[in-house]
Image: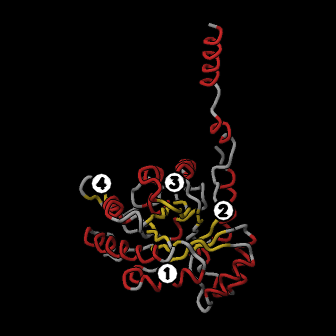
Amino acid sequence: MKKNLLFALLALVWMILPNESQAQKKGEPLFQAPLGIASYTFRNHWEHGVEKTLDIIEEMGFKEFEGGTPQGVEPAAFKRMLADRGISIPSTGAGFEQIESDPQAVADRAKALGAKYVMCAWIPHQRGQFSKEDADRAIKAFNEGGKVLKENGITFKYHVHGYEFQPYENGTLFDYLVQNTDPEYVSLQMDVMWTHFGGGDPAGLLKKYGNRWVSLHLKDFKKGAPKDMTGLTGPENDVPLGEGELDFPAILREANKIGIKHMFIEDESEHELEALPKSIAYLKSLRY
């Protein structure tokens, strides 16, 4: 009888107290990935000096870089410049036509940089009128190109840009893309702002498609600015993280549940040097 009472008391204590994972989470940072930066953020800087630009990136505390080599710089040299500053390059990019026509050349460039991921950020289509035919072309190119990349030890990922949320059947053309690409060859990168811009729910889609997502682009969208299905908006609508419409705590919680390891800030404003410190401080302030 005493033994049964002891077990009952222990069970009651177990139910009342938070479990170990909850206790460990409390107060921990929501942003748990290495601080990453997308190359496009510094599009206006490279021409003024590659090493000078990399010095700025290092001083801001970035540890991961996503992008290709600046014009006139060989991959091996660029990789060394980054490494000298304690920055790795886990991911690079490629145009749709490159993936479609010569994925082996894409793989060779990625390997020269030491990148493990290749990202494609745009599917050709008539502005604002992304269609099933456009999606079908992409499905074929991504499945076939992704297979070649995997054979070279590289993961292909499609960077969501917002125009894919055209309604289709019981969902969207984005759903159609995901359902018809082979998870063995095609992963996903969520640009949280473009997803929101096109009418998608970033946190909800992270939850829905789980480990198909392997990385994020982090940027925020000006409160009240107009949105449409073009995947295009002006730089004046890009604001520091935490100042716009995006729910970053919800996004980061879902990203952490999935286990996403790479998150790159991409600032498309024309005031990136002023905005980036604000975005970094905001990310570091978020807690469970």
Residue 78 or residue 154, whichever sits in front: 154
At x 62%, y 72%, the residue is 65
Residue 27 position within the rendered picture, expressed as x and y whole percent measured from the top left:
69, 42
For marks 4 and 3, the one nearer the N-term is 4
Does the residue at mark 2 contact the one at mark 3 (Cβ under 8 Å)?
no
- Amino acid type, label 2: Pro
Which residue is labeled 3 in the image? Answer: 245
Q: CA distance from mark 2 to mark 3?
A: 24 Å
Which residue is labeled 1 in the image? Answer: 107
For marks 4 and 1, the one nearer the N-term is 1
Does the residue at mark 2 contact the one at mark 4 (Cβ under 8 Å)?
no
Residue 222 position within the rendered picture, expressed as x and y whole percent measured from the top left:
52, 59
Q: Residues within 10 Å of mark 4 (few under 14, many from 20)?
A: few
Residue 23 or residue 36, whichever sits in front: 23
Residue 81 position within the rendered picture, expressed as x and y whole percent measured from the top left:
71, 82
Give the numbered dot on residue 34.
Answer: 2
For marks 1 and 2, the one nearer the N-term is 2
- Amino acid type, label 4: Gly
Q: Under tag 3, what secondary structure?
A: loop
Q: CA distance from mark 4 to mark 1?
A: 33 Å
Does residue 69 appear in this view? yes
Indicate the quadrant containing the C terminus: top left, top right, bottom left or bottom right.
Answer: top right
Does the residue at mark 4 contact the one at mark 1 (Cβ under 8 Å)?
no
For marks 2 and 4, the one nearer the N-term is 2
Q: Residues within 10 Å of mark 3 (few under 14, many from 20)?
A: some
Residue 62 position within the rendered picture, expressed as x and y whole percent measured from the top left:
69, 68
For marks 2 and 3, the one nearer the N-term is 2
